[in-house]
Image (tube, rainbow, N blue to C red):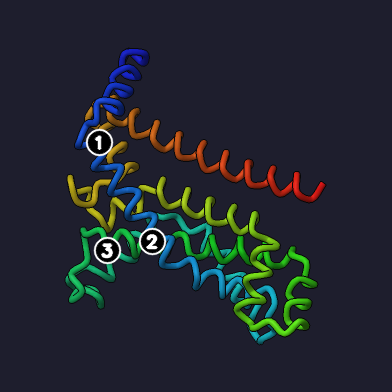
């Protein structure tokens, strides 16, 4: 395999508007963005309750979320496959090997990551922002928004970490999506398939998309942090 020639072919695929390649990119982004959007607000509220609330079993629940972060995605995919298969309890939903199943699986993957990292952000925040907002008569939603603004960069880092996790995972998407062309084939599953066939050009091109995405997200986060640092000095 000529690495330089393969890289040239990958770049050509990216800039020539290869429909198959960009269709895979579209599936990957649409599924992952929808998955994280559906769990973002519930994860935010649960993280806040775990950080600022006082109720029995709070630390047990937090430990459960922290443990769920380390579950391999292929195990989550296997459990979801068993539930969505015809013999499973959710077989009537007929979701197996569809984008809906992939979205559900990625929601299960990123939800504990969001809760754990957002909990850490709230835990390390200045509680005076919350208390001051309440003292001034702000409603609970408005006080929460004030607190979120105070720790916006750790919250943004949590969202970026969760999104990076699900858009690059392959185990769950392969199990419940089936890697069907023009339907459930996303970037990681396509890379695995094309590499196994020896078609490295498309795999390298898709890998470049992920690298550009990761670079862009980190530049965005660093820029936001830099702006905040300038305002405080």
What mark, if any, has residue 100 been given in the picture?
3
The residue nearer to you, when weighing 219 against 119, is 219
Label 3: how many Cα within 10 Å (few below 14, some 14–19, many 20+): some
- Which residue is at 28% across, 63% downward? 101
**Sequence-wise first label, 3 or 2:** 2
Q: Which of marks 1 and 2 is nearer the N terminus?
A: 1
Quarter placement of the N terminus: top left
Dot 3 and dot 2 residues touching (CB under 8 Å): no
Q: Residue at x 32, y 66 (%)?
A: 80
Between 19 and 67, the one lying in front of the other is: 19
CA distance for labels 3 and 2:
9 Å
In 3D space, how far apart are the residues under numbered discs 3 and 1 (Cα atoms)?
21 Å
Identify the residue under disc 1.
21
Residue at the spot 32% in from the left edge and 17% down from the top edge: 8
The residue that disc 2 covers is 35
Decide: few, some or many residues near mark 1? Use Cα within 10 Å; few <14, some 14-19, many ≥20: some
Q: Position of residue 136 (x, y in %)?
A: 76, 81
Does residue 69 sit above or below 4 in this rendering? below
Depth check, mark 3 against mark 1: the one in front is: 1
């Amino acid at each position: 395999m000529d690495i330089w020639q393969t890289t040239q072919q990958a770049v050509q695929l990216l800039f020539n508007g290869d429909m198959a390649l960009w269709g895979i990119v579209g599936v990957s982004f649409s599924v992952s963005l929808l998955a994280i959007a559906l769990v973002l607000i519930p994860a935010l509220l649960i993280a806040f309750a775990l950080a600022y609330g006082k109720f029995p079993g709070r630390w047990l629940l937090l430990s459960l979320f922290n443990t769920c972060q380390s579950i391999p995605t292929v195990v989550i995919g296997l459990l979801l496959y068993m539930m969505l298969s015809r013999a499973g309890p959710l077989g009537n939903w007929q979701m197996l090997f569809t984008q809906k199943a992939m979205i559900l699986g990625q929601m299960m993957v990123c939800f504990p990551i969001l809760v754990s990292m957002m909990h850490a952000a709230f835990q390390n925040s200045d509680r005076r922002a919350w208390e001051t907002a309440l003292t001034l008569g702000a409603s609970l939603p408005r006080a929460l928004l004030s607190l979120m603004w105070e720790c916006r960069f750790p919250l943004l880092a949590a969202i970026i970490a969760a999104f990076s996790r699900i858009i690059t995972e392959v185990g769950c998407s392969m199990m419940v999506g089936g890697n069907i062309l023009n339907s459930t084939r996303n970037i990681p599953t396509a890379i695995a398939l094309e590499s196994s066939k020896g078609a490295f050009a498309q795999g390298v091109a898709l890998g470049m998309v992920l690298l550009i995405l990761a670079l862009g997200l980190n530049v965005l986060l660093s820029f936001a942090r830099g702006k905040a640092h300038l305002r405080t000095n």
